[in-house]
Amino acid sequence: MLTLIFNTTKRTVNVIGAYDQNYSWEKVPTVKVFDGYYEVMQKDELDKSLPVARFPISNTIMLIEK
């Protein structure tokens, strides 16, 4: 089971529990629900949102922090 923590104030995402690896992203404007997945969107240098990771909803707990 994965835990995805989305901090809406700092605009960061941390994923804990992925095969003893932790993942993190900065400049995250949103996490979309897309076709059975949580999709992490990140801003690039041109201020364009791009998908950087997908995690299955059935295997992921998402927590939203402020």
Image (tube, grey):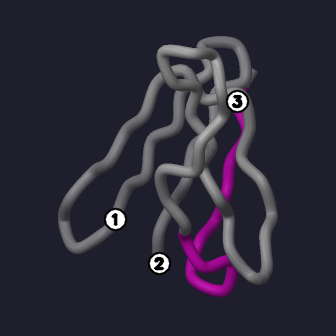
Q: Residues within 10 Å of mark 1 (few under 14, many from 20)?
A: few
Q: Tell me the quarter of the picture where residue 57 sits.
A: bottom right
**Residue furthest left as drawn:** 20
In the figure, 48 relative to 53: above or below?
above
Q: Which residue is mark 3?
A: 65
Which residue is found at the position 58% from the left and 50% from the top?
51
State the image coordinates of residue 28 (x, y, percent, origin top left). Answer: 60, 29
| Quarter that holds the C terminus | top right
Decide which of 66, 41 is in the foreground and name it: 41
Decide which of 28, 8 is in the foreground and name it: 28
Give the SS element for disc 1.
strand
Give the SS element for disc 3.
strand
What separation in Å lies between label 2 and label 1 (alpha carbons)? 7 Å
Q: Which residue is mark 2?
A: 1
- Give the residue type that dot 1 points to: Gly
Q: Which residues are the magenta region?
A: 55-65
State the image coordinates of residue 31 (x, y, percent, origin top left). Answer: 71, 47
Position of 20 with respect to 59 (left or right) is left
- Contact check, label 2 and label 1, Cβ < 8 Å: yes
- Give the residue type that dot 3 points to: Glu
In the figure, 18 relative to 52: above or below?
below
Count of numbered marks: 3
Which residue is found at the position 45% from the left and 41% from the top?
14
Q: Residues within 10 Å of mark 2 (few under 14, many from 20)?
A: few
In the figure, 27 relative to 2: above or below?
above
In terms of sequence position, does the residue under pointer 3 or pointer 1 come before the other? 1
What separation in Å lies between label 2 and label 3 (alpha carbons)? 19 Å
Q: Residues within 10 Å of mark 3 (few under 14, many from 20)?
A: few
Q: Which residue is mark 1?
A: 17
